[in-house]
Amino acid sequence: QVRLVESGGGLAQPGEFLSVSCAASGNIIQVVTMGWYRQAPGKERELVARWRHSGDTDYADSVKGRFTISRDNAQNTVNLQMNSLKPEDTAVYYCNAVIVTTTNIGPANYWGQGTKVTVDA
């Protein structure tokens, strides 16, 4: 079984910064992708940033240049540094990972419980 544990987030004013981290644990053979999605009230969940096993990263256009995702391979963690925050960044941020485990036939999709980020003056 895989567990994703999120930390960080909270309240910030516009222009400030926050970070969120996610740690994966369990019977992991390989992390294929790991990253963050967010869901604002009344909106669909959207990709924010994602790390790929190849080392490539993906970012939503709305966060490019402001958010940076980084990964600690040894710890199976990802960190999302969020700078120059805007009110529209307010959402619940969910860690997501596609992982191959000792019990899955192929890669499986896992979600964290979510952590709230609020940007408000």
Image (spheres, grey):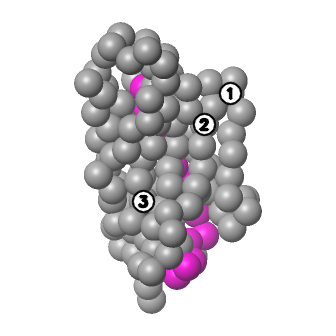
Report helix, strand or loop for mark 3.
strand
In the displayed structure, would residue 7 be above or below residue 85? Answer: above
Report helix, strand or loop for mark 1.
loop
Q: Which residue is mark 2?
A: 51
The amino acid type found where label 3 is placed reads Tyr
Q: Residue at x 33, y 46 (%)?
A: 112
- The part of the image, by quadrant, that contains residue 57 is top right
Q: Residue at x 38, y 17 (%)?
A: 104
Relative to 23, 17 lies left or right:
right
Q: Which residue is mark 1?
A: 55
Q: Which residues are magenta?
A: 76-88
Percent position (x, y) of residue 13? 46, 80
Percent position (x, y) of residue 89? 53, 72
Which residue in the rendered view is the most extreme toward the front? 105
State which quarter of the image contains the N terminus. Answer: top left
- The part of the image, by quadrant, that contains residue 26 is top left
Q: Residue at x 71, y 33 (%)?
A: 56
Question: How far apart are the two marked residues, 1 and 3, measured between alpha carbons?
Answer: 22 Å
Task: Mark yes or no: residue 90 visible.
Answer: no
The amino acid type found where label 1 is placed reads Gly
Q: Residues within 10 Å of mark 3 (few under 14, many from 20)?
A: many
Q: Residue at x 60, y 43 (%)?
A: 50
Q: Is residue 8 magenta?
A: no
Question: How far apart are the two marked residues, 1 and 2, measured between alpha carbons?
Answer: 7 Å
Q: Nearer the viewer, residue 113 or 8?
A: 113
Mark 2 or 3 closer to N-term?
Answer: 2
Q: Which mark is residue 120?
A: none
Percent position (x, y) of residue 27? 31, 16
Q: Which mark is residue 93?
A: 3
Mark 1 or 3 closer to N-term?
Answer: 1
